[in-house]
Amino acid sequence: MTVSRSRIIENGLRCRCPNCGLPTLFQEGSRFRVNEACPACGLRIENGDGAFLGPFAINYGVTAFGVVIPFILLYATGRVGAAVALPACLVGSLLVPLLLYRLSWGWWLMLYYFFLPGNLPANRAGHEEDDR
Ligand SMILES: [Zn+2]
């Protein structure tokens, strides 16, 4: 069975394993502990050596461009005062990364495998190799 790009997008948006589609990105009962590998299909999720940088970049980008910069621009143009802009930036820069943490992993894996779908074990020729 192969995994199409549309299936990769669907799994990424639903925060599921891009290979098998099961909700196995995070350890059972944990909101923040990423599985090293999918317990169902064995796909390596946390590869070490900077695997967290993709989700980190997504989280940082959404927080900066979705919260902090807009409030800085609103303050700079005089539409909101410092009493609104500063707390909004502080609270937003703390809450948004926490709220987006799980989604950022799903989105990162979605982006990675959308451009490299042949790296998914389900899409490899022969399917006999493991994904290490
Ligand atoms: Zn899986």
Image: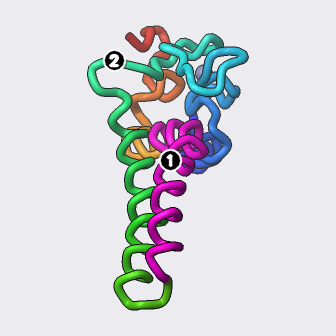
Label 1 CB less than 8 angstroms from ligand 1: no
Which quadrant is the N terminus positioned in? top right
Disc 1 residue type (three-letter)? Leu
Q: Would you identify the image quadrant in which residue 46 lies?
A: top left
Frontmost residue, 65 versus 34:
65
- Residue 8: tell me if it is visible: no
Label 2 CB less than 8 angstroms from ligand 1: no
Q: Is residue 37 magenta?
A: no
- Residue 89: tell me if it is visible: yes
Frontmost residue, 101 versus 125:
101
Q: Badge 1 is on which residue?
A: 94
Give the residue drawn at x 53%, y 73%: 84
Q: CA distance from mark 2 to mark 1?
A: 25 Å
Q: Which mark is residue 104?
A: none
Q: Would you identify the image quadrant in which residue 65 lies?
A: bottom left
Give the residue drawn at x 51%, y 62%: 87
Magenta segment: 81-110
Image coordinates for residue 41, horizontal then vertical, percent: 59, 15
Frontmost residue, 17 versus 2:
17
Magenta stretch: dominant secondary structure: helix
In the picture, measured across the screen, residue 91 lies left or right of residue 115, that is: right
